[in-house]
Image (cartoon, coloured by chain):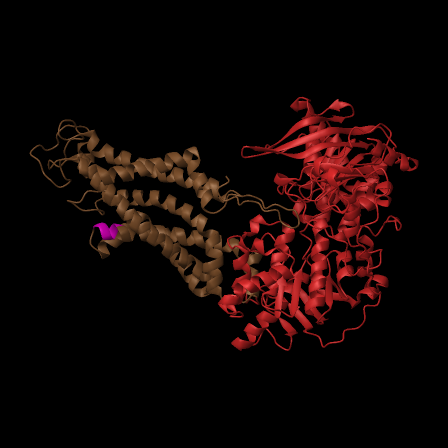
Chain colours: A red, B brown
Amino acid sequence: MTGTAAAAAACSDTLPVASGEVVLDVRNLSLDLRTGRDRIPVVQDVSLQVRSGEILGVVGESGSGKSLTALSVMRMLPAAASVTGGEVRYQGRDLLSMPQPEVGALRGKDIGMVFQDPMAYLNPLMTVGQQIREVLRLHGASRREAAERAVSLLDLVGVRDPHRRVDDYPHQFSGGMRQRVIIAMAVANNPKLLIADEPTTALDVTVQAGILDLLGRLRKELGTALLLITHDIGIVEDVCDSVLVMYAGRAVEQGALHDVLRDPRHPYTRELTRSTPRLDLPVQRRLSAIPGQPPDIRHRPAGCPFHTRCPHAFDRCRDEMPPVSDRPAGISHVAACWLAAEPLPARPVATAEEVPADRGAPEAAPILEVDDARITYGHRSLLRRQPPRPVVDGVSLRAYPGRTLGLVGESGCGKSTLARTIVGLVPLLSGRISIDGMQWTTTKQAERAKLRRTVQMVFQDPYQSLNPRQPIRTLLTEPLVVHRLVPPARREARARELMSLVGLPAGMLDRYPYQLSGGQRQRVGIARALAVEPRLIVADEPVSALDVSVQAQIINLLADLRDDLGLALLVIAHDLSVVRHLCEDVAVMQAGKIVEQGPAEQIFGAPRHEYTRSLLAASPGSASSLEDHR
Amino acid sequence: MSVSAQAAPATPDGSAPVPAARGRSRYLRALATPGGAVGLGLVLVIVVASLIGPYLLEYGPYRQGPDSLAAPGGDHLLGTDELGRDLLARVFAGTRLDLLITLIAVPVAAIAGSLLGLVGMVNRPVGGFFQRVFDVLLGVPAVILGIAVTIALEPGTEAVIVAIVLVTMPIFGRQARSSLLGQLPLDYVAAAEVLGYPRHRVMLRHILPNIVDVIFIRFAVEMAHAIMIEGGLSVVGLGIQAPQASLGSMIKDGSGYLLDRPAYALVPVVVVVLLVVGYTMLSNALNQAVLRK
């Protein structure tokens, strides 16, 4: 315990802006999940406090237990989960032992909640006004009060023209506006505590920035305490006052935002911030990725759950979980690590190899040439007067061997459609797409087959891009069989070679996709694409479905393959920091058109188009003033 | 649970595979539920009884004795019919014939229907054509279809089989088609296309294994359906013809003596009900265990 106390003493001069009273006090909370006959501890010994007017960010990867912790506050745990220890106090009242009707009275009145998917939480058959009024009426407002307040709430959350919009249905609102409506419902009764579980994950970056701005404003104007759950440390950095980092069901580090980010005392926190690509730091050749995968909840290692991936782990870490919970009062920054007493030692390996700002001009001829491409879904029809609106409207691009072209834009801008057209899944309406001199419109069978082998695709969702009924070996050898690339006797060797190319052990060849983690599946997806020895790989959001600590591994892998095999990469992403890290050339797409394209350093350093500038400004982590935190 | 869970070798990056029951073990798990066990038990008892039963009896199903419409008991456990034939022997024979008919007709319908339902993936117009054929077949009541088949063929076992195939094949076709449409947007199908796999390969090797569970469950449902179709056709006299016994034809013949000899018609009814209930419970159990994610 001396360790954490000393750690706290070291940063006691920067106590958080502990403004108000403690609204939510969670102490030593532990949760179990029942699966079959087993009971798995999913959250262990988590303590947190949220004060009025404060935003606490709970950051963690999938399976870290962050959402279950939040749900337990609302007593809304799924049936399979149960509280095994600890207490949850709301303004001093014990929520866990409170009778159900009293909890019901608190929900929606004193405690509001905002979820990830804004459409799923609105009733499509009721106007938004009706839904907001319902919340108000249930908690005692009169009909007239409710009607007036509904309009002012919509105004508060930034819905324009609230008098008219109050009678609109959810489908008449955009995704971001729906989330604003949900927030309006959540804050309708001036709750003291607002819980937001990944409130912006389903939204575009510019919309996300607006929602985060709104949450920050509500905190100021209403003095609400906000518990914000997210996987994105950039969001925490932008809006939170304090932060709780969770890993494998444990609270590994917590404290005031600046303390934790400037002087992380838990290796996981530091590795997490380091492995996240950033817009405000020089581009490194390799991201410093955390090795390995987050542990499966059934097979969490003993001792500190991070020790299998930790560069500083020693014997004691393997046997004993470092304490964090029984800290003395008044100490703000604690970490569950034996080494927390002092600033973390420097990392054993220095991999910092900066990429020069000017990454040079392409040397070889382009392998992909897209000229004035127009793409649409649907056909011309006698019944329709106008031809269908093009999804991609006059796009021209070039991709070069050994280089990465990044295509960025928000959802619905046509970037995925363009990717699918380049790989031949969607036909072109007009224009020309030429890959190594070949086109999809060719009628020659042999040329088509060659084209198939020249361009390959890596998909966003590693859970549905691999056939669940095939073992990895079949997934990797089937392309060899179909294209008759390798004689049968050599296929096994080639499969092993592909596995080692993407950094997977050959022993995994017999596994099925469901037995692999998300990052491993994405590696298999990449290996399968490499099986036909392509020269161009189109990767559609290759890391956005992965956990933060795994994203960096996959980004590094793609960069290595590009450099080692001389591949041309076309990476489609909404995350500008990923694109900035990986790409030499960048094209920004909006509403089916390329609004700006050029070398990465130019796009990110001196964006010319208004839209590029707004995307950059909205990216999480960019609002940070913490240039020196590592 | 641990049937398919592989020993978990620690991978270099420290992750352990998620043990999950998949494939065959999920079917076993379905049979271990109360509903699945009872359903399977019902079907098995009837199947085994109809196979072994005849060897335990003194009389065959066609042997006519001196007593017609004898009361249950004595030599004839369930009594005799109007021609003096042993009713229990005829119930066994009828059950066997019903099981045989459905075991021929439903698999044929399942395979043909599923393939015709999937063919739209390889050839869109042909697939569309068969869906319209299925629409028409689904629009015609089973009995009307049966009448048409018996007019075209002779009434009898073959006609019943053809009628069952025609009634259930469109259901499999629709099922396969809707499952196919559920798989098509998934990225693994796109990946197969990007890798240049031929369409028929994608259909048979990739999509079919992923929808075979649904078809299998539908199979159990349609087995129950087929028993009822046979019964329906035979009751109106279009099905199995004398002297052969089937559950349906016995119900028809026995219904004339319902007051004097209730067992004549009611025993076949009970067998039909038990079979239908058994298949249905089985399909429900499979549905829950296999399709639940």
Provide residue A582's location: percent of width, then percent of height: 75, 61
Q: Is residue A46 above or below residue A513?
A: above
Q: Nearer the viewer, residue A256 or B133?
A: A256
Q: Quadrant of the N terminus of chain A?
A: top right
Q: Is residue A513 above or below residue A215?
A: below
Helix, strand or loop: magenta stretch: helix
Provide residue A139's location: percent of width, then percent of height: 71, 28
Q: Looking at this rendering, what residue extends furthest in the left direction?
A: B66
Provide residue A474's location: percent of width, then percent of height: 52, 59
Question: What residue is at 71 percent from the left and 75 percent from the top?
Answer: A366
Left or right placement of residue B2 versus residue A113 in this view: left
Q: Is B201 within the magenta? A: no
Q: Is residue A525 above or below residue A222?
A: below
Which quarter of the picture shows residue B237?
top left
Question: What residue is at 56 percent from the left and 64 percent from the top?
Answer: A493
Task: Tell me where the magenta segment starts and ends, as one range.
Answer: B156-160
Provide residue A57's location: percent of width, then percent of height: 78, 40
Left or right placement of residue A33 versus residue A314 in this view: left
Which quarter of the picture shows residue A52?
top right
Left or right placement of residue B136 versus residue A80 in this view: left
* Residue A174 seen from this side: no
